[in-house]
Amino acid sequence: MTSLDHELSRERTYHDTCRAALARMIEGADEQVVTGEDVSASGADAESLGYHLRSYAKQLGEEPESPLFFGRLDLADGRSHHIGRRRIIEHPAEPPLVIDWRAPVSRAFYQASARDPQGVAVRRRFGWAPWSKGASEDLTGLEDEPLVSAAQGPAAVSRILAGEIERPRVGPMRDIAATIQPEQDTLVRSELAQSVCVQGAPGTGKTAVGLHRAAYLLYTHPQRLVRSGLLILGPNRTFLSYIAEVLPALGEGGIRQSTVDDELARHPVRAQDTPEAAAVKHSALMAAVLHRALYGRVSAPAESLAVPDGSYTWRIPLAELARIVEEVRAEAPPYAVGRERVRTRAVRVLQLQAERRAGVPDSEWLRRMGRARPVSAFVDSVWPKVGPEEIVAEVLTAADDPGLTEGEREAIRWAKPPRSFKSAKWSAADLVLIDEVAGLVERPESYGHIVIDEAQDLSPMQCRAIARRVDFGSVTVLGDLAQGTTPWAARTWPELLAHLGKDTAAVVPLTKGFRVPEAIVELAAAGVTGREASRVSVLPATLAKGLEYDHVVAVEPAAIVGAEPRGLHRLYVVLTRAVSRLDVLHCRPLPAEMLG
């Protein structure tokens, strides 16, 4: 038996040990759920404990069948760590059999080099049979990379690493925990409070970086993110289906993955905008238009306030009421909060009068004054209750805001206004406007972190909708300005980040491609910058973004270019979906830009 065979045999035996330990972990988690349900704790504590135990058991039970480790670190101090997608232990008091790839000690697996070994003597990579479900006999190879004694010359290319990166793309997207590169690892391990914008051409691993950062943050800040939430935003549902299995494979399930349109879907989309109307509605101008329309409902009081209280009547002079409204308006709270502040401060004036006349009133008196008909009538007159749909319908019916040009007003004006906003048929862009007003009325709950993929296609108003949902959190923005295909696609990242409210976020380029062959990139870039073989997926160019295939057949590039104003960008997206082979079928002449 050769030394390689001997090492493979040892590692296969170790993998069997890990598999048995994982089985015991799953069994133990199920037992803890049963035991936890019998614990006599207080209601809230018992519910929290039960949720934690059930979630942990569910995660372990749904662990995908796959190899349990992909690497090993032999440290200079003699210790050794196997690295995998999940931590595996035999006993809580003993060192883990496998360390989670997100753990601090695992960072050296991705970052250590001959120039900076970080305490690593040897880095070992394991080669597994393609599509292995984790049978030990599928461990077919291993590679050792000495670091401490290595010459500080060019790093040797890992055959196993290259093979894993170049493995054919079949089915949904898979994780890259085994192949994360140093520049990607730095982004993945960015602090939770840090917002990051990742700019990268096709195949640079933007999406994978974003998903792995989400998994890393959930591992590092579990309590905070379980409480505040983490959201993955993709361009369409096809894309979300493609990436759906990545986080579960990394041990993180139950994460909300959605599109911007789905997040704003307060009503079904039953109308279609003209391109001109959609462009205006998605522009940042509409934020000011809607703000003026909403707060235009606020007005100065017209008369003093008299509030009967038994045989006595309390009075608030007109000037005092006007002062209350002006103060609250200057404070600029959410509209609904402002309305209640006006009520509260009017009641406070009545309270002070009552204290001077008869002593401190009780809480029941205060509640009664707050509900008194004259007080409610005053509040309704100066700060009326209103819904976001009503405001948007008003704007689209009148379309007379001075902040818009006549052409812009004409573009968005309803040709046949509905009888009431309740019977209106809303377009997708209208729902963005409704969400803007809803955010002015009452702030939505904020996520702790949002990952935004294909962000270059977001409009200013869509960015504002996201910003409201991550007001106190951070974002990972992923995209490629060259792939912008919407009429409102971003021209620069600082512009888009400003609309997201994250203008201090660092813009980090990923420049090393791992998927698209250089010849394909050159062919695609000429125009923009101057699944299984037994199955064929046919999809329009509009849904190709973010997906990847071993073999792509692009049909009639000239038609793709001519279909929309940013057609060249759409063609760029189509041509860069291929991993290994690209064929172009056409009857019409190819766009001149493709010919160089």
Image (cartoon, rainbow, N blue to C red):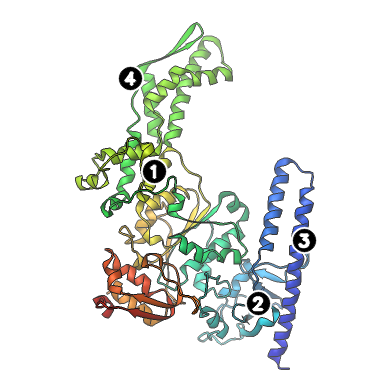
Q: CA distance from mark 4 to mark 3?
A: 71 Å
Q: Provide the secondary structure element on which disc 3 rests.
A: helix
Q: Which residue is mark 1?
A: 434
Give percent across and percent down for residue 155. Answer: 52, 84
Q: Which residue is mark 4?
A: 302
Residue farthest toward the left in the current orientation of the protein: 406
The residue that appears at 24% across and 77% down in the rendered structure is 592
Q: Earlier in the sequence, mark 3 or mark 1?
A: 3
Check disc 3 and give the amino acid type: Gly
Q: CA distance from mark 3 to mark 1?
A: 49 Å
Q: CA distance from mark 4 to mark 1?
A: 30 Å
Query: Quadrant location of residue 26?
Result: bottom right
Disc 2 residue crowd, few under 14, some 14–19, many 20+, Cα 10 Å: many
Q: Earlier in the sequence, mark 4 or mark 1?
A: 4
Q: Provide the secondary structure element on which disc 4 rests.
A: loop
Which of labels 4 and 1 is toward the front?
Answer: 1
Q: CA distance from mark 2 to mark 4?
A: 77 Å
Q: Earlier in the sequence, mark 1 or mark 2?
A: 2
The residue that appears at 73% across and 68% down in the rendered structure is 22
Q: Earlier in the sequence, mark 3 or mark 2?
A: 3
Which of labels 4 and 3 is toward the front?
Answer: 3
Q: Earlier in the sequence, mark 2 or mark 4?
A: 2
Q: Which residue is mark 2?
A: 73
Check disc 4 and give the amino acid type: Ala
Cβ–Cβ below 8 Å for labels 2 and 4?
no
